[in-house]
Amino acid sequence: MELLRKWNKISLVPRIIFGLILGAILGLTLPGISAIGLLGTLFVGALKALAPLLVFFLVINSLARHKKGARSNMSTVVVLYLISTLLASLCAVAASFLFPSTLTLVQGAEMAAPGGIAEVIKTLLNNAVSNPIGAIVNANFIGVLVWAVIFGLALREAADSTKLMLENISDALSASIKWVINCAPFGIMGLVFSTVSTTGLKAFADYAHIILVLVGCMFFVALVVNPIIVFLCIRRNPFPLVFRCLVNSGIMAFFTRSSAANIPVNMSLCEKLGLDKEKYSVSIPLGATINMAGAAITIAVLTLAAAHTLNITVDFPTAFLLSLVSALSACGASGVAGGSLLLIPMACSLFGISNDVAMQVVGIGFIIGVIQDSCETALNSSSDVLFTAAAEFYGRRKAGQDMGY
């Protein structure tokens, strides 16, 4: 017990780094012990199980207790999400022209890809009105948010005892999430072990260039584009906030590779930043759905790589249109089975690339997914907190209040 108390006194980030290193060592030396990898599966499973319930009850509780006339910053948050996604897409297109990539096309996954933006939007709308219980069970956060908002508004006139019950449930779920997050070092150890023991670096050698372009774009957005956006909001040095979000949210998201699983982590970070619970309980799950800068980069880079491979000339108007399509479709990526990769055929259609060839590009995407998807999720998830905080600090600055940052 004394050892456990000393362990818990150590900050979470150093503990996670320790788990990361230990997982890599065990993956290289003891790859046959599959039970170690089970720790990662259980950790991600626990986060995914609690996340929909946490979002559902936090949003209901926040809206039920919302005071009439209180200001909301949701419009600012949404604008920041959309601007970041569009700028990320433009950066990806520019990088693809500066460092053109080509692919050795192979037989890819045979999956049904969406036929166009209209289909993506249709999927999102259908998810929004799905059965509320089914939405929670299937971690359909668009549906969870829509029904939570409806129930929260309907319960504004409820008795105080009902509102107290909702608050108690929200507090219980928040406490449960904290317990799960405290197990993160062991979960990360299991996830790293599974990756190192089953995936060799040789598998990525043929795709080193495309991986560098993808990861380079994501780092550029995380360390240059996003800080500029945040600075314009808070008019202070943005990097302390940027690095805190990357370390506390991005590292976890990198290994879980799930924006949904990282929602509880982001909410916990928002609480530590002193943000308004009524606001971040809505903006964080919303960001996990529409704030998809990493997905926009993936769609644009792999689509242009396919175009370069087939010697298709891409002019400026078409490249700009690709940026818009990538940004718009990325916002609906979480509403499509397979995420951002299965939206590549839709973008490829701009250049007349056949669906068969486009699905081979998707297959390559799955091959490099261990790196691509990890970095994509880290960028997407960490920027959910970053822009939620930036929007709230912007509101405080405009009102002449202390930003607390």
Image (tube, grey):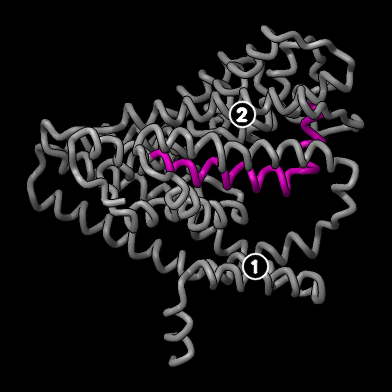
Q: Is residue 129 visible?
A: no
Q: Nearer the viewer, residue 42 or 264?
A: 264
Q: Position of residue 378 (x, y in %)?
A: 57, 47
Magenta extent: 359-387
Q: Which residue has dot 1 on it? A: 20
Residue to which mark 2 is pinned: 296
Picture quadrant where residue 308 is located: top right
- With respect to residue 401, does 301 lie above or below? above
Measured Cα–Cα span from mark 1 to mark 2: 28 Å
| Left-right relation of 347 to 148 | right
Q: Position of residue 274 (x, y in %)?
A: 28, 53
**Vertical position of residue 227 compared to residue 350: above or below:** below
For label 2, count other residues whose C-alpha is less than 10 Å away and answer few (under 14), some (14-19) or many (20+): many
Q: Identify the residue at image location x=29%, y=62%.
A: 172
Residue appearing at x 51%, y 67% in the figure: 13
Asked if residue 382 lies in the magenta stretch, the reply is yes
